[in-house]
Amino acid sequence: MVFRIYSLIAFLFLGFNVISAQGNLQFVQVIIVSDVVQTVPSGKVWKVESYQQHQVGVATNLPTNSCVELSRSRPYVIDNYSYYNVEGAGNGNTSFSNVARNNFPFWLKAGQTVKTSCPGDFLSILEFSITP
């Protein structure tokens, strides 16, 4: 009987610690990331709110990697993978294909890296600390 009581107390103690170990988010600052790689610090998470491209023309929305080609959308880079923020192209009567748009916001965890392709572009980010 005594063993059961101690087991129950131990179980409840561990259960409450697991439940409360998730932590809370506390706003720290707004971060603007451009073409220099930034890493999410330990104990933090980043909420990427938007991607602003310096200039985009309306002639085409096919993507490009060149900063000189201002009439096309350019990628932002997360963990060395390129992501394009483009809408569907064409209306079915052209040779353009539809391309899915990346939705905002999205979250990055500690250790992930992010940057834009060009100096004039930027990502708007909210930084949060994880508090117990």
Image (spheres, rainbow, N blue to C red):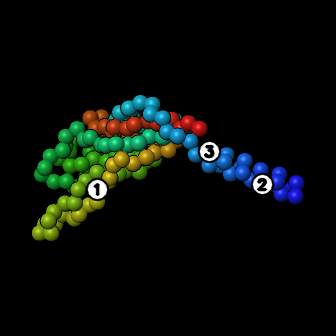
**Element assignment for label 1:** loop
Residue at 28% in and 60% down:
100
Q: Which quarter of the rendered picture does the N terminus lie within?
A: bottom right
- Do the residues under discs 2 and 1 have CB atoms within 8 angstroms? no
Mark 2 is surrounded, within 10 Å at the Cα level, by few (under 14), some (14 to 19) or many (20 or more) other residues, namely: few
Residue 86 at x, y = what percent? 25, 53
> Tag 3: residue type?
Ala
Residue 8 is tagged as 2
Q: Which residue is mark 1?
A: 101
Give me the C-alpha separation between circle 2 and circle 1: 51 Å
Residue 26 at x, y = what percent? 48, 35
Q: Is residue 111 left or right of residue 102?
A: right
**Element assignment for label 3:** loop
Q: Foreground residue, 67 or 116?
A: 116
- Do the residues under discs 2 and 3 have CB atoms within 8 angstroms? no
Query: Which circle's residue, 2 or 3, is located before the other in the chain?
Result: 2
Q: Which quarter of the rendered picture does the C terminus lie within?
A: top right
Residue 90 at x, y = what percent? 16, 63
Of badges 2 and 1, nearer the viewer stands: 2
Residue at the extreme front of the image, as rendered: 1
